[in-house]
Amino acid sequence: MDGTPARLSIVVPCYNEEAVLEETVRELTEVMNRLIHDGKVSPQSIILFVDDGSVDKTWAIIEQKTLDNPYVQGLKLSRNFGHQSALIAGLETTGEFSDCVISIDADLQDDVAAIDEFIDKYHEGCDIVYGVRDKRDTDTFFKKNTALAFYGLMRKMGVNLVPNHADYRLMSRRALHELMKYQEENIFLRGIVPLLGFKSAKVYYNRKERFAGESKYPLKKMLGFAIDGITSFSVVPIKLVTSLGFVFVLIGGFIGMYALAVWLLNHTISGWTSLILSIWVIGGMQLIAIGVIGEYIGKIFKETKNRPRYTIEWDTITEDKKVKGQVNR
């Protein structure tokens, strides 16, 4: 790397964030001013807000900020494609002309002060820097323990996740270039990024309460996100269903031998209860098995269509902003 300051892009996915957007712009602008003043990043660095089909005033605020703020640029998707697709849209857009890209959510729960350390780690030669929560004090008991259980389950299934890391990370241009080779429809960035294998580091920070607005990840979405993560990276659930099938067949064999023994000893009794329980248990397992297999078949169905992950309706990035940086890594 030469002495030219790195050109940084900060990608911020947004969905109905009008309540917090003004403060988000203010805090990220302060960070950018400080980094440029210290000579850590280029004055050509930008903050890209990706509007994921918001139905409030999010895009109107972004458009206004592009006129008032030299760093702010906007990318508007044609509809709501989901957080991961919006994030990918921002990464793909900025990856061609940035030396490094930092992704962060708009809700200001991730500590923006950690960005300074992200950049320091980048200058030390790291291509990927993970923002990792030091504590989970702001989470409810349920959310904290289910999150820890999810990370533990993924590790047991052989998925190399970084515990307590969401999508707050820095990636160099070459890391982004490799990431874009992964073209699956149901992309799970937290699992894919560690697969890249470049030199990485962790920056620990304490997560704050949401500045304003409501969480965009209620329980239903969190469960769906967890299922996507598991089924995108592991076939263990199908293997588990197969194993359970063998177990129930074995149990059935023992029950059959027990019934035969009772009949030979003339101790036959009414078996209504055991029969009904068996029907419900086996029936339930069959439905679960069909559901697990259906998840995988559904993913195959989506992948074979090869549809685009997002559609850009409008962007405010001018051609001079798209000139590639001079730092090569």
Image (cartoon, rainbow, N blue to C red):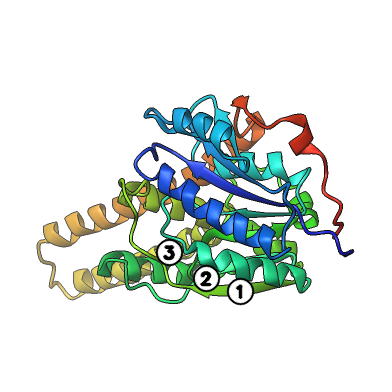
x%, y% of residue 222?
Answer: 38, 52
Image quarter of the C terminus: bottom right
Res. 202 mark: 1
Left or right: 136, with 305 as reference point:
left
Residue, disc 3: 244
Residue at image coords 66%, 74%: 201
State the separation of the CA atoms marked 2 and 3: 36 Å
- Amino acid at the residue labelled 3: Leu
Which of the two labelled residues, at mark 2 and mark 1, occupies the earlier sequence position? 2
- The amino acid type found where label 2 is placed reads Val
Q: CA distance from mark 2 to mark 1?
A: 6 Å
The count of marks equals 3
Q: Is residue 19 above or below residue 288?
A: above
Q: How far, Cα to Cα, is label 1 from label 3?
A: 39 Å
Q: Position of residue 217 (x, y in %)?
A: 37, 49
Q: Is residue 159 visible?
A: no
Of helix, strand and loop, which one carries label 1?
Answer: strand
Q: Residue at x 40, y 63 (%)?
A: 249
Question: For this view, does 18 lie left or right of residue 200?
Answer: left
